[in-house]
Image (cartoon, grey):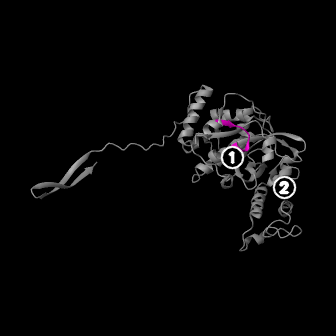
Amino acid sequence: DIGHMARQQSPTTVCGLAVANPDEEWRWADTLGNRRPCDNCTAIIARLADVAAVEMMQAEGFEPQMGCLPDTGAPRILLAARAITAAVNKVIPTSSDHMSMVPWPTGANAMLGNATDGNCVIVAIVNAFLAQWRLFRPNDPAPVFTNKTCIDAYQAISGVYTSPGPGLDIQTALNWFRKNGIKDATGVVHRLLCFMAGPPDLNSIREGIWEFGAVVCAANMYAGQMYSAVVHTLVWDPLNQGAAQGGHAFLAGAYVEQVDYVRVRTWALTVGATDAFITRNFQRAVWYTVFEDLWPHYGYDRQVQCVTDLQAITGETWSGPAPVDPSPAPLPEATVQLLTKQFRIFDGTVQLLTKQFRIF
């Protein structure tokens, strides 16, 4: 009952356009009048649309699979701070929201397999790619991913071909994407060129969202943050967490200073993560991703830094495209032909008036 859920979220403190009174029926027609609903009501309507979009989520007691294993702590990783600081004289805005523009998968494929399999790491990386695509290539149709494409990648990496599978750690999955890429629904392979780790704090997450469009994150989840709980509140907070459930990976793609939340995409929902949740529950690192399809849009300085760091830290030769130098291309050589000259004689002195040339 969408109306019932809305009343649970917004008792009497809304503008009255979306919910007139918690004891009255949900009044969708009220939002169609001449008056604009307040921001609170608008947010509720948008979030409830997420819930209504996935039929399987309406099943009582439905819970998606956990599947993010602890990070391996392998030392040979690129540090996000080096690529982040490549942007000189940057000013990070107080709010940034790329997620609201992304055409997320819907219907039966909305969860990209995480309803049945512990492939949340794969889903988080794919969602980061979609968020970056919408930011950097908004006029180009985005690749389409399905339950099958994400489960196939998950099973190929884990080596386990029965659901729900053993889960994955983020770094192992990112390395696999860098070497193999991931196929979309049409069979096109999208390759990850490199990835970087940053500290799991609010500033690092905000910088990553602003400069890369998305950040792959992971958290230790408890009963109070599981789907059956969060579908009603749409906020992750460490209060009343309950029993531990396991690790979960997701995309962070927006932050809003007014409510002090980072907004994440998970289980086909947009959920707010409070600062307290980030501090207490986030795992060791957050991850910034650089994809080949979007390489020209990351900026020359950051491209050079990625190439230099990957070769220095891993000992591998960079196999991706070269950095795109923003310097203007030199003008082609040209031949100049003198066509005419015009003179005048004044007091016995010859003065040149004009010259006409042709360049070819």
Asked whether residue 4 is drawn in magenta, I would say no
Could you tell me how many numbered marks the image carries? 2
Residue shown at 43%/44% (left/top)? Answer: 328
State the extent of the magenta-drawn residues as a range. Answer: 195-203
Residue shown at 23%/48% (left/top)? Answer: 337
For badge 1, the amino acid type reads Arg
Circle 1: element type: helix
For badge 2, the amino acid type reads His
Can residue 17 be seen here? The reply is yes
- Which residue is denoted by mark 1 in the rendering? 206
Which residue occupies the extreme top position in the image? 315
- Which residue is denoted by mark 2 in the rendering? 232
> If you read the primary sequence from the N terminus, does the residue marked by circle 2 or circle 1 appear first?
1
Query: 217 or 14, which is in the foreground?
Result: 14
Tell me which corner region of the image, top left, top right, bottom left or bottom right, holds residue 21.
bottom right
Which residue occupies the extreme front position in the image? 347
Q: Which quadrant holds the N terminus? A: bottom right
Labelled disc at residue 178: none
Q: CA distance from mark 2 to mark 1?
A: 26 Å
Residue shown at 86%/40% (left/top)? Answer: 245
Circle 2: element type: helix
Determine whether, in the image, residue 288 is placed left or right of residue 357.
right
**80 lies above or below 233:** above
Image x and y of residue 80, in percent: 65, 37
Can residue 115 be seen here? The reply is no
Query: Do callouts 2 and 1 mark residues in contact (Cβ within 8 Å)?
Result: no
Determine whether, in the image, residue 348 is placed left or right of residue 249.
left
Residue shown at 77%/51% (left/top)? Answer: 272
